[in-house]
Image (cartoon, rainbow, N blue to C red):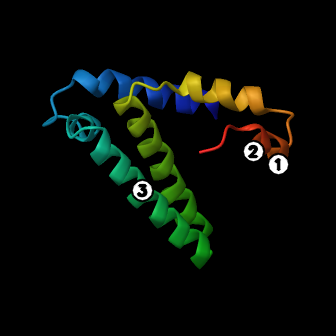
Amino acid sequence: MTDVLRSLAATIAARKDADPDSSWTAKLLAKGPEKCAEKFGEEAVEAIIEAVKGDRNKLAAEAADVLYHLLVMLAARDVTLDQVLAVLAARQGTSGLAEKAARPGP
């Protein structure tokens, strides 16, 4: 799975300088980080709806959209997939409760 996500992240990064008329990804990125975040939120809500409905195939499709739009949003803010994976790797083996308790407050 990581290979697929890395490949997708590389494609998204390559589209940052593409003509927005030739690429959906370039069009999203040209609209700025706020629009990318808005689109990610829309896709997340659609995934939630499918999770509640219980259609596994539709949920899988919406989850794919969520992952794509998450990577676009990250790219819009110059955050790499490797940075995210490093955070996950650092948390590995730590209880979720302990990890949350160790985070700095708001």
Circle number at residue 30: none
Residue 27 horizontal side relative to residue 99, left or right: left
The residues tagged by marks 1 and 2 sit, at their Cα atoms, a distance apart of: 5 Å
Q: Is residue 33 above or below residue 16?
A: below
Q: Is residue 68 above or below residue 82?
A: below
Q: Which residue corresponds to mark 2?
A: 100
Q: Is residue 38 above or below residue 2?
A: below
Residue 23 horizontal side relative to residue 55, left or right: left
32 or 14, nearer to the observer: 32
Q: Is label 3 or label 2 in front?
A: 2
Residue 21 horizontal side relative to residue 99, left or right: left
Query: Looking at numbered disc 3 in the image, what kind of residue is underneath it?
Result: Gly
The residues tagged by marks 3 and 2 sit, at their Cα atoms, a distance apart of: 23 Å
Q: Who's the residue at 60% across and 69% down the image?
A: 51
Residue 77, horizontal then vertical, whole percent: 38, 30
91 or 54, nearer to the observer: 91
Q: Quadrant of the C terminus?
A: top right
Q: Are marks 1 and 3 in contact (CB under 8 Å)?
A: no
Q: Which residue corresponds to mark 3?
A: 41
Q: Are marks 1 and 2 in contact (CB under 8 Å)?
A: yes
**Mark 3 packing: few (<14 Cα in 10 Å), some, or many (20+)?**
some
Query: Looking at numbered disc 2 in the image, what kind of residue is underneath it?
Result: Lys
Residue 78, horizontal then vertical, whole percent: 40, 24
Q: Which residue corresponds to mark 1?
A: 97
Q: Who's the residue at 39% across and 60% down the image?
A: 42
State the SS at label 2.
helix
Mark before the other along the chain sequence, 3 or 2 = 3
Query: Looking at numbered disc 1 in the image, what kind of residue is underneath it?
Result: Leu
Q: Is label 1 or label 3 in front?
A: 1
State the SS at label 3.
helix
In the rendered image, the residue lying farthest to the front is: 105
